[in-house]
Amino acid sequence: MTSRLHDPDGTRYGIPTFGWRLAPEDYATRRQLRARGLRPGGQDVAAQVLWYSRRYWRKGRSPIRVAYLYRIDHAKPVRPMTPAKWAALAKANAAQRVCPECRRDAGYRIPTSLGRCTTCADAPHVAA
């Protein structure tokens, strides 16, 4: 364990800080809360987890990664989806399936790297 990243009383970082996999059971990340059907519910960040990552060890970038933790006992249940929310989500997903070039529903989400459906991207470019 790296003692530099371990500060359970919060004197160094201002909030309780734990090393990788050392956080107490009563804290959870947003993803962990969501997996339990909960959300932070307006509470502030209660603690954090810090760890070194070789993936982010590049010039000009900090190799220390952070995950914010929330208290599970202060979390609230996830709000249920209303029919209006379902309709808005369906409309947004449908808009991402329409090719801006040929205006057809591609049947899949248009890749942002191409900006058009694969049929239009594979077609030979015709100079005007």
Image (cartoon, grey):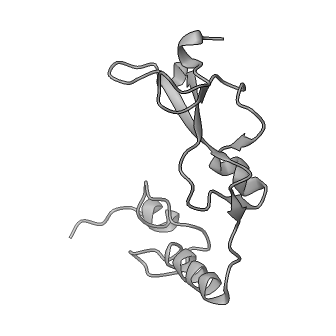
40 or 10: which is nearer to us?
10
Tell whether 112 sits left or right of 29: left
Tell whether 128 sits left or right of 9: left
68 or 114: which is nearer to us?
68
Percent from the top left, x then y, of residue 4?
A: 53, 13
Please count the marks in the image.
Answer: 0
Above or below, comparing residue 9 to residue 35 in the picture: above
Tell whether 72 sits left or right of 123: right
Percent from the top left, x then y, of residue 50?
A: 56, 26
Q: Which residue does the image show at 47% across and 26% down from the upper left? A: 13
User: In the rendered image, which quarter contains the N terminus?
Assistant: top right
Rendered image quadrant of residue 120: bottom left
Tell whether 23 sits left or right of 122: right
Percent from the top left, x then y, of residue 7?
A: 57, 21
Q: Which residue does the image show at 67% across and 85% down from the upper left? A: 82
Rendered image quadrant of residue 77: bottom right
